Image: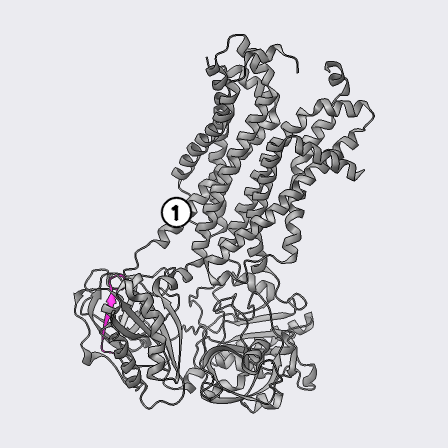
Amino acid sequence: MLFYYMDIGWRSLRRTPLVSILMVCAIAIGIGITMTSLSVYHMMSMDPIPAKSDRLFAVQLNTMDDNTDWWSDDNMPFQLTFKDAMHLHKLKLNDRDENIDIRKTAMLVAQFAVHMNNDEMAPFLAMTRIAGREFFPMFEREFVYGSSWSQEQENNAEAVIVINQELNERLFGGSNSVGKEIYLDDTPFRIVGVMQQWDIHTKFYDVNNGPFDSPEPIFMPITLVEPNQIDTAGNTNGWKYGDINSWEDFLQSENFWLQFWVELDNKQETQRFEDYLLAYLTEEATKGRFEREVPSFSVRDVNNWLDYRGVVSEDNKVLVGLSFLFLAVCLANILGLLLGKFLRRAPEVGVRRALGASKRQVFLQHLVEVSILGLLGGSLGIAIAQLGLWGVRTTSGNYQALATMDLGMLLAAPAIAIVSCIIAGLYPAWLVCKTQPAIYLKTQ
Amino acid sequence: MLEIKPILRSLMRSKAGAAMLIFQIIITTAIVSNAAFIINDRMNYLSQETGYPEDEIFSFSVMTVGEVDNLSTLLEGTEQLIRDIPGVINANLINNVPVSGGGSASGFGSQPASERGPDTRAAYFTADENIFETLGVTISEGRNFRSDEVIVGSTMNDVPQVVIVSKGFADTHFPEGNGLGQTIYFGNAPMQIIGIVDKMKGPWLKDSAVDSVVVMPNARASMRQKFIVRTEADQRDIIMRDIESVLLEESNKRVVTYMRSMDAAKANYNASDILMVRMMTVIICVIVLVTALGIFGMTVFNISKRTKQIGTRRALGARKSAILRYFLVENTIICIVSAAASYASSLFLGEYMMSEFSLPALDNSYIVVTIVCVFAISLLSVLFPALKAANIAPSIATRSI
């Protein structure tokens, strides 16, 4: 029956080519525009780590005096001071068995010139994530060769690094490079692991400088920051004047420049961790480090964190909203055209009704016809959206990875097209299936 | 005369079709007026004068690898090397590149920071006396740095004694306009204002204090040193292409990166606004097209439905102009009915966007102009099919279908 309806629908569309083309174009343009902005939005707002996004938390501590203005929504600094971050990093919440302790890591980003200390390869710059070894299990990182550095190596601040597959390809042609040395600035580092390529659109663990940049290709133990005097390549924000004359002064200063993440698997762990933060901040306040009436901190999971940091720009939300309004206009357009088209066919429907077609069958037949419209428009719409996304990509390199359609969006396009066409077709189809056969049989 | 009554009656008979047209016009007006407003807002922002000759300036970073005896001497040599390239007007070491989206800012107060007085936030650049020529800005009051005031070498504790500020900073911090000669503090270090630059922007164009800039005479080189170069406009691209090999020839223990022209850096910083302008322009064009086609399609349809009726009217003595007028008046009625609702919906959408997002309030004139334009476009879309309808032969009425 469906095929028969499709056949009738197709014939009917061909009978009025101009109107059919107008309708297909309207829906195609509507879908094209909507899918362009929706695809970018989808890529920006996609959960970067779906399996764990509700168990990974970004930590903020308010270690400023009361009445210090800060530009975040809740007046809380986005990053932590070195002393707080390292205190929490080394903290043992469960001192009986450290295997069941919670995973957490302080981190920051730095930049180094990578070279092999020979004349064959020109040095190049690479971003480096400096973190604890728990970074890898926390963020579900697997290794192609080797593994992360050991706890002992981290404690001893050994010059070891993990590199990603891409860098391993570039430096060693993809072979097992564990145990080899590369130079970062002037220090040789030994590779202990090659990490699987990490393809995420949002660098959610550090959205300070370019939230849509790729993850760093090199990872290094955070304990090296102090002895090697590694400065951040990210933001450093201060609120309080302090005399800083040495690296030691800088590490002890109230400047914010580190990020901190913690994995909390259940309510009890969250409670325990928050209780600890409260106690810690209260104690720091009594030491006179800052003047606060009420200690304040924040622990946000991945999606809340991205939302709080406004990773999806407002412009993008405006675009998605306007695009859907635009789609509504296209639908109103189609509705008006369908209304005219279907009603003109009332005599034909009258005959079909007289020959025994039920209202239901007539109704369904017309809905099948509009679905064909939707499918055609949706397919053409994908082509238009590709054109639109290409236009977005040419605007700036930042959109290279974001302005693409994944499989979900490709399937969503015809689905949205068909559903919206059916919505537009409901009223005209209902109107036409109410046709009284008698009237048309009489005049013919 | 205008046959409004029969038109209204006929419209009432096909309410749904008319309602869809009205709905379409209302939403179209709301989208177009708001989109046009956003475009204008962003265009104003994008086309603002930075005060710099953007097409003459480019910047890059030199990262020195390995041990160097005297970095400042090395990089000053490099600086001189660049200045000697034909076509280069001037070049300078700088801590951060203006309008690039990356920089440093601090509070500058009238008292030392340890006394916690009120301060004014300003972006700061550190460079030597060549920076003003390199950036193409002029010192309108006071004087430039003397070369003996510029700090070179690597001692951390030397601080500049003098400073040149932008007029934006001077007017904010000294509202009476007597900034020249006053002392401001960077941390606890006092600096005397010896010059004021009329127009100068900081690194972040979106900053509320973008015009507040302080330039300190400090040419201390760093292992990751930024360079800024001004050339003749028509030679910039060639120099940008060739400069890396010149720099590497001088020393191969370095990485040259972030080679960017000032306009490219600015476009990159403003990418989201440029994208917004483009998307909004496309939406406006396409929505106008879709609405026009929709009105066109509806009219063609109505006419083909009423062919016989029109033929009869013509046979009964109606002139061609009367037929044409009928459709134009019908469209005008629909537009007038939509106008009030269009106005309200545009206003509502504008208010909503203002409350949800950080967009400025929609200006009423945009709505009015949009309504008039949509009216004109809808009349145009009706005109063509209506002219065709006017040509329907009266004889058609005598034929049976």
Which stretch appears magenta? Answer: B160-170
The type of residue carrying mark 1 is: Asn
Give A239 or B245, whichever is nearer the viewer.
B245
Is residue B161 on the magenta stretch? yes
Quick check: A223 left or right of B261? right
**Residue A166 showing in the rendered view:** yes
Q: Is residue B268 above or below residue A2?
A: below
SS class, disc 1 = helix
- Up/down of B252 relative to B400, above or below: below
Q: In the displayed structure, would residue A179 be above or below residue B320?
A: below
x, y (%) of residue A235? Answer: 44, 72
Check residue B142 for magenta coloring: no
Locate residue A343: give its quadrant.
top right
Total labels drawn? 1
Q: Which image quarter holds the C terminus of chain B? A: top right
State the image coordinates of residue B126 (x, y, percent, origin top left). 29, 74
